Every structure is written in C-alpha cells, then in structure tokens.
Amino acid sequence: MTEAVLLNISIAILLLPALGFITLILFGKRIPGPQWVGTSLIFLALCISIYVGFGKLAFYAGQNLIMEGRWIQILNVPVLGQVNFDLGIKLDNLTVIMLFVVNLISFLVHLFSMEYMRGDIRFSRYYAYLGIFTFSMLGIVLTHNILMMYIFWELVGISSYLLIGFWFEKKSASDASKKAFLVNRVGDTGMFIGIMILFTNYHTFTFDTIFAQIAAGNLPFHSSAWLTACGIMIFLGAVGKSAQFPLHVWLPDAMEGPTPVSALIHAATMVAAGVYLVARIFVMLTADAMLTIAVIGMITSFIAATIALTQNDIKKVLAYSTVSQLGYMIMALGVGAYSYAFFHLVTHAFFKACLFLGSGSVIHAMHHEQDLRKMGGLRKKMPITYYAFLISTLAISGVPFTSGFLSKDGILAGTLAFGSLTGHWLIPIVAFLVAMMTAFYMFRLVILAFHGEPRDLHKYEHAHESPFVMAMPLVLLSVLSVFFWYGLNPFNPSTGWFLDKWIKTPTTIVPQNMRFDFMKTEAPVAGSLENAKAGEVKTTNAPIAVGAPKVTKQNESETAIVHSEHYMHAMHQAHYPAMALSLLLGGIGILFSFLLYQWKKIDPDKLAESLKPLYKLSLNKWYFDEIYAATFIGGTLAFSKFLAWFDNKVVDGIVNGAATLTRMVSKLGGLFDHVVVDGFVNFTAYLSGFIGIFFRKFQTGKVQTYVVFVVFSVIILLFIFRPFF
Amino acid sequence: MEFHSILNSLTYLAPEITVSAALILVVLFDLILGKNKKALPVIALAGMVAASFFVFQQMTFNGFAFSKVSQPWINVGMITVDSFGAFFKSIVILATVLVIFFSFSSEEIKKSFDRLGEYYTLVLGMVLGMFLMISASDLLLVYLSLELVSLSSYVLAGFTKLRERSSEAALKYIIYGAVSSGLMLFGISILFGMTGSTNLYVINSLLQAPNINHLALAFAGILIFAGIGYKISAAPFHFWTPDVYEGAPITITAFLSVASKAAGFALLIRFVKITFISGVAPSGHWQMIPAFPWKEFLIVISILTMTLGNFSALWQTNLKRLLAYSSIAHAGYILMGIAVLSNQGLIAVLIYFGIYAFMNLGAFFIVMLIANKIGSEELEDYKGLGYTMPFLGVTFGMFLVSLIGLPPSAGFIGKLYLFIALVDAKMIVVAVIALLNTVVSLYYYIKVLREMFLAKPASPSTAFKLSPLSLILIIVMLAPVVIFGVYFNPIVEFAKGCVTILGL
C-alpha cells in the first residue's frame, strides 16, 4: 500500500458517513430500514480505518503522510497579496488511532441504537444526525489545517446541538441543546480569534507551515506574549468543547439527549476533540500557556469529581466523571505529559463509552428510570451489562491490569514530575485526590445500581438483560479496557507499542526562553539540530499545483524528540511513587464506597448531615448554573461571579442599577432609532423607490420614444466622451 | 484568395458547418415528416452535440479562417478561432441544449406544435449567427452575424403570434433592432472610412498612428457600441429588453438572456480588445490606444446599466419582467469586469458568465414550469407556492440566492472575482457602487421568496407532479450553482485557460 492509497481511502472514510447523512436526511422516511444504511456505512468506514491504521502504523509509523490541494487561490488581494486556502488531510499516528476510535465507537453506538431507539418517530433522522456527527468528527481528526478544523468544529457543534435536542418536545432537552450551543459559542469565539491571530501573521491555515514559521523564530506580531495569547485563545475552543471550567456547565445538561448519543458524543469522541485540538497545537504552547492549561484542567477535574460524589442521576454521575477525566487529560497536556494525555483519551473513550452504553442498557431495562436511588440488585437480572460495567469501572478507577490504570498512572506520574521540576505541587496533589474520588463515586454507582436489594420492586420485576445488539458493544468495549491491547507489561505502559512506537511527544517549537526549564533542549540532546533541519524543510513551502492534490511525507522521527533528559529522569523517578500512591488512594476510595453503600458500616445520610455545607455544595454542582444565571443577568461575568459568593445584595444592586441604566439608555436609543435611524432607512427606501419610478418613466412601452431615447443617448454619450472640445 | 486557403479555413469552421447542416436537416425533415415533429428537436440536439465536439477541439487551437496571405499586414482573417471564442461558444451550446429541453415541456411551444419546424430552424439560425459573432474579427462579418441573430430572434420573439403581447414585442423588437443596427452600420462605415479596412487587426495597426481624427473615432466607437449594447441590453440601449422579454415565449426569453448576451459580450470584448489595444502589461492590464477613453466609457455604461436594472426591478410585479431587469443588472456587473481592461477582469467576466448561464436559465425554467401549472407569471399568484410546490419553491430560492450573489452560492464566487479584479485595478468606487447595487437587488429577489414562503396560498393546493425530465434539468442547472459555490477551482482554471484572444 502506497501513501497515496492510504490518503485516498482516508478521504473515503470521511465521506462515507456524509453519504449516510445525505441519504437519510433526504430519503430517510422512504427507506424501510434506515438504521441499516447508517450502520453499514459506518461499518465500512470502520473497516477502512482499520486497514489505514494497520498500513500506517506498520509501514509508515515514523512518517506523516500529507495530501493537500488548493481550494481557493486569490491573486492580488489588497494588502495581503496572493492568498491561498489549502485543503488537505494529514495522516500521522495520532490521526489513524483517532480514526479507529471514532469509527469503532460510532459503529457500536449505531448498533446499540438499533434497539435503544427502536420505534422513535424520528428514527431515520436520528441516524442521519449520527452520520453528520461522525463525518464532522472525522473531519476534525483528519484535517491538516486549522481552518478546516474550525469548520468541522462548528459542524460537530451543530450535530451535537441537534442530538441533544433530539427529543425537542421535552423543554429540558431543547433548553439543554440551546445551552450547549451557546456555551460552546463562547469558547469558539476565542478559538476563532486565535486562528485569526495566526492567519494575520502567517497568511496560511496549515499547521505545519505555521509551526515552521514559529520554529524559524517568526513570532506572531514579533512578540512572545502574542504567542501565549494565541495558544490560550485556541485553547478556549477546547475549553468549550471539552467542557472545561468555566464552560463545563453544558455537558451535564447535554445528558438530556438519547443515551447512546451521550456515549458517542458527550463521552468518547466530541468532547475529546478539545483534547485533540490542544494536542495538535501542543508544540506552539509557551510555558505560560501550558501552565494556564494545566491549572484549568486541574480545577475542572477537581470540581467535577466533587460534584460526581453526590449525584443521584446515573447519567449525571457519568457526565461529571467525563468532565473530570477530560480535565485530567487537559491537565496532562498542560504539564507536558503529551503522550499520556492522548493515551488516556483513547482508553477513556473505550471505557467511558462502555459505561454510558451500560447505563443506557440499565435505563432501557428500567423503562427510562435514571435515578440511582430506585435501582439496585440489577446484577442478577443483567449479568452481561454488570460485568462489562464493572470492568470499565475498574478501568476508570485505575485498578491494575486495566487500560485506565496505565494511562492514569502515566498522567499522575507526569503531574508528579511536573511538581518536582517546577514546584507546582498543587497540581499533583489535586490529581491524586481526584483519583481517589473517582474510585469512590464510580464504585458508589456500581453498588447502588447493581448490588444490594432492589429498591423499586415494580421496575425491578420488568428489568431484563438487553438484546444482543445492545450487549455486544458493551462486551467489546469492556474487552478493550484491558491492558494488553496497549502493551504487554501491565505496570509500565512506556514499553508497550502504543507509547513506545506510536505516540511520541513532539518537540516544542517555542523559543527556548519561553519554555519550561525542563522542556529546553540542552545542547547534547540530538533534537536541536534536527529541529532546525525539520524547520528548514518545511519552510521551503513548495508551490502547490492548483487543484491537483499533492502528497508529501514528513519524517516523524526528525520532528519527534522528547523532553530534556531532566524531564525523562523526573518522569522515571515519579513512575513508581505515583503508581503506589494512586493504588493506595484508589483503594481507599473503593473501600470507602463499599463501607458506605455495600456493607453500610457508615450511614451515608449521617455523613452528609455532618458535612452538610460541603455536601450541599457538591449536590448543587457548586452552584455553577445558579451563578451563571445570576451573572448573565447582571451582565458582567467575571466580576459578579466573585461577588455572588459573598453578597447577594451587592449583586442585586448592580443588577438593578444596570437594569435602570439599560432602560434609560435603551429609551434614548429607541428615540434615536425611531427618529434618526428609521428616518434614514425610510428615506433610503423611499429614495430607492423614487429612483425606480424615475427610471420606469422611460419605459413608456412606445417604441418610437425608445428610438428617440437611443439616438439622444448616442449624442449625449458623444458629448460626454468627446475627445477635445 | 486561393482555393486551398478556403479549404484550410473550413477546418476552423467545423462548428458553424455542423450547425448549418443541422439547420438544413431540420428544414428537410420538417417537410418530410408531416405532422409528426418529434424528430426535429432530436436533430437539433444532435447537431448541437456534434458542434460541441468541434468547439471543444477549438479550446486548444488558434488560427484565422479566410485569411488574406497577400496582404502586407500580418496574416489575419475574417474569422478568429481561439480558446476565448470556444468558451463563449460552449456557453451558447449549453444554453441552446437546455432551451431545447425547456421547449419540450413548455406549454406555450406545445400549443403551436405545427410550426415546430420553424422554431428549431430559427433557433439553429440564431446559434449559427452567434457562433459567427463570437469569432468575427472583421466588421463586415460582425454586422452580418449580428443581423442573422437579430432576424431570427425577431421571429422567435413573436412565435406565439396569437398572443397580442407576443406580436407587439416582436414588432417593437424589429423597429428597435433596425435603428440599432443602422447606428452600428453608421459607425462601421466611419471606421472604414478612416482606415480603409474592415479587419479589426488591420484597423488596430492603423489606429496606432498618431494623426487619427479622435472625434470621428469616438463617434464611430459609440455608434458601434450602440449596436452591441443593444444585443447585451446595456443602458441606455436596453429599452427593448423588458417589453420583449415579457412578450416572448419563456424559452426564447431565457435563450435571449443567456445565449444572445454571451455572443454580444464576446463580440464587445473582442472588438474593444483587438481594435483599441496597444499592448498588454506584464501585470495583465491592457494598454489602450489613447484615442478613446474606453475605461471611463465602460464604467459609466456599466454603472448606469446595473443601477437602472436594479432600481427598475424594484417595482416589477411580473416575474419575466423582473428577471428581464435583473438580467440588465447582471449585464452591468459583467460590463464592470470588462471596464477593468485587464486579463484578470476578463477572467472574472468569463467566470461570471459561466455561472450566470446556469443560474439565469434555472430561474427562467422554474418560472416557466410554474407558469405551465398556474398559467401566470404575476408575483401575486406566487403566494404560498413554497408550500404548494415545495421542490420548485426551494430550488427557485436557491437560484435567486445565487443571482443575488450570497455565499455559498456560485453567484457569490462570480461577484467575488469581479470585485477582486476591480479592487486590484484600484477601482474601489466602482466596486462600492456595485456592492450597493447588490444590496438593492436583494430587495426584489427576496420579495419573490417572501411571496412564496411567507404569504398564505391564495387557493387550496392541487397536486403537482414534476416530470422526470424537468427534475433532471433542474438538478443539472442547480448542481453547478451549488458546487461552484464551494469548490470553484475548476471553473476558475477553465476561465484562466480561455482568456487568450488570438494575436494578443
């Protein structure tokens, strides 16, 4: 298989779900089995992506394959000169793994939904939406430039909106979809600003060209601060999409969508797109930007984990756990543990999809009951679901021999190393606390739902194991949550093929003085020389033939050198302490949940009573929704958010004051609008109409007048354009 | 002229010969077949397909037909074959093929089925005239071909002769056309008197001399423009357009608005570029002979044309008339691209025309289908059509959006390239005026959409079944409008390859 073949069939992967979408949205109602159209197309895409993944990883593991073609070429744009918009796809190891993950989970969700969504009045539309979502997500994964990424990013937002509000008859669902859309907009605006900073400076959207320019020392607006700002701005897009603090509020509400959708979009793939984005721009992040990212990730993971402790809705618990795990990944990127962040993205995608589908299976069996307090004892009724769920729970809690243990341990080691190298000890401390909480709330979930005695006998009586198409995805996903897919050593993932061969931390291209100390390339490290060479190769920027796609190869080994010896050393040192600590804390978490809910040694209600303020804080999700509601009315976000904590009166005062002022201003504005603007508009309209009537006067319908007009026009034109006199 | 020179020329004339052959066959079969006229459009179509084959051959080769080797001048002839001409010929062929298909489903044409022979003969006659117009590089041929097109179109405009409006339109058209061609002939004779030649290339080399009479030249230029301006309906020579467009059968209106305009524009560009150019700068800007201010002249005409077209369209209540004014406005936009007097402007014009052909024909076709059904072209009868005929409503909306030039339709790309050419030539003021014009045009196009989608249907809906042919035709025209809106490199590259005018 040549690189051209791989690239071309990757485009086929991209287009297959789009084909499904178009077919289903246009003819969905007339096709007898719409689910089969979507599912078979995704299955085909999955097969191709396995083929591509195999071909890439087996034969081109050290290279990036790029195919690009010119979309628009505009010559002579004022100020900018020639402007090119290139479209293209880039296949690197990150991409092919993501292709597989997205297609696999999408396929399983398609399969699962056949049963779960059966009988829905908009069944074919549901599959159409799944198709457009998969298409857009694959687009994000494949693209080699940030413009296309932004386009697909927005498409993903749209499809997420459509799917959250799929049951739009429910007010909560349509509200949630609007909320998700608007909150994401906030992040996307930041991302757009970041993209524009890049485009203004480099006149291109292609990642590699931009990075080559930065590597060559050509900073945006010749200022390192702008580079930091640019990184943080683009990161804002990830904050929105990956539900990071302070824009995390939409994700739990998004659980109003159908549960398989939650598994696909709001757990495994779309929300991971933010992490993927940060991984893509990782090389241009300065130390300040990375620290910001790490702190945001830390705050997110902590807040979400505390909230998940007390939620009673099975999907809400999983939603907050997703937010928390996404925070983990973002934090890992921030501390430079790039490969572990991506590793966790992949492992999390599988076990979280499994958890969500498992919860879907439970909800389906319990006739759409989502309250944990009404479940219990389901283990006997639904053994397959139970064991799949349990394996995934073990994985997310970081129990050895699971994939989650490997990736999580890597992240924890990364934070620990980061702490020891930079002195930011808060990050590892919070990370370990979160690990403990995760183990606790996940086991609480399992125990409440599956163990013990049934609390709602009526519903329990009717519960049943799910049919094959629902159980099969669960089994497959739980199998994928076991360690041996990623490496043979269950305790050290860095020797496994996933991290050793496939995913390497790329070299940062940020100027030396703006990196963390541990990321500086000291002289002996082979990278600095290679780095310069790689930059040189890329800056040649060979002209691309318009229309004809160009296929290029990059040597990945040239561009991939890891951090300084320092960091590697610290990482190595941190590995075993981190593992021991995480095992200990995870064990404590699990133990606590058993004490509280299984053996009932401690009464959870009494504990809640004694920790009432904290309990309430967690149960009410840190009052984020309330805060945002209050602050948006007030109009100023950051300012009154702070005040709302302490003094409602101050806020109210501001609100009232603002309202009065707004009313006054709007009255004035209304007056202005009414008299001046309306007047102007009406005048323009009137004038246009008058001109039209004026012109119409000439159209008398009498041919003799026309002839006169023509002759006179010639004379007048001659008079106007007379040469001399 | 030697015999073998004529023989050689024939290879350059392959498309014209094919069309003539098809024309003769249509006449013959009309006589042979008697009542059953089904074969006639097929013959016409076959002729067009064969012609298109030869036209595509012409995309790559250049040359003169009927050249006079004995002349001391460069080797030039009456007919110039080049890729520029091939582009416009392919537009004409496209329009003709589509219009023949339109005629299948047109109720108006069906009613006078016994005269179908005449109809197709005249259409093919027009095509022949337009081909010659596009290639003509000799004033005599310019005039003759223009007359050939005009005479055929006079008859076609009045084809449904029992309708009063149709006959009235044809009569107006004849009188108006006669005056215009008279003016043009006057201009041609002045030019001939000044230079002693009718060949544009020869005239060009003679005009380079410093001692020409500028007044006479300006007069000749304006008079000849009056003749061409009447064909492309540029203000102030447009007066016939709304009346004729409204009176003629819709198929012919669509044909006039695209094919005959294409031929007119090709003629204008060739005339201006060959006759008045002194060289092309490396940047692609044309250096003109300073004898006549073509740039200013074309700018004034184009602004006048688009403004008049758009503002008059505001008040129209008849769809055909509205589209007539809209086509005047579009002629203004295209003229603006010519006024840039640069290769980039020319590319923009070609792109615009390629797109305009699809969107305008599409809009006319849907108006025709709706007229077939409801028997009216009045705007007030369009109330609620978006609900009674959703497919037609939506596709019509897409064509209109493209005519406005909103992204992501192809119309936007056409305008974008025009504006880029303008800005590149530092004609910002013109660009701004054109933009404001586009804003005005928004009003009357959207007015149609408003009637269709926001007004309540006047009468309860009756089932409307679209024939498969119509469906295919709509899709064929809509596909480029949509696709070129997002992926327009092919058409841009195609246009770039077709800017070569022979000898320059």
Image: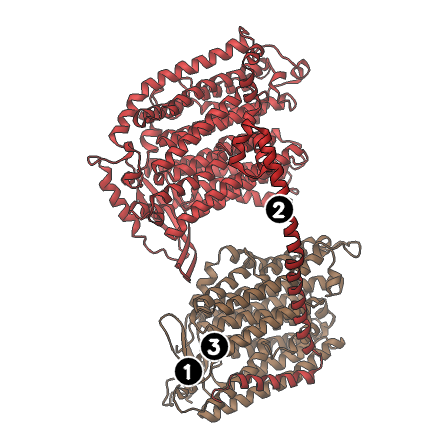
Chain colours: A red, B brown
The image shows residue A461, relative to residue A239, as above or below, that is above
- Under mark 2, the amino acid is Leu
Instruction: Determine the image quadrant of residue B155.
Output: bottom right
Q: Chain of mark 1?
A: B
Residue A321, x across and y down, in percent: 50, 25
Crowding at dot 3, Cα within 10 Å, few <14 / some 14-19 / many 20+, comes out as: some
Whether marks 3 and 1 lie on the same chain: yes
Real-space Cα distance between discs 2 and 3? 50 Å
The image shows residue B216, relative to residue A315, as above or below, that is below
SS category of the residue bearing label 2: helix
Crowding at dot 2, Cα within 10 Å, few <14 / some 14-19 / many 20+, comes out as: few
User: Mark 1 touching mark 2, by CB under 8 A?
Assistant: no
- Which residue matches tag 3? B295
Q: Chain of mark 2?
A: A
* Image quadrant where one finds the N terminus of chain A: top left
Instruction: Determine the image quadrant of residue B226.
Output: bottom right
Residue A465, x across and y down, in percent: 60, 19
Real-space Cα distance between discs 3 and 1? 11 Å
- Residues B337 and B3: in front is B337
- Under mark 1, the amino acid is Ile
Closer to viewer: mark 2 or mark 3? 3
Mark 3 or 1, nearer chain start: 1
- Which residue matches tag 2? A26
Camera sees residue A529 = yes
- Which residue matches tag 1? B289
Residue B177, x across and y down, in percent: 63, 83
Real-space Cα distance between discs 1 and 2? 58 Å
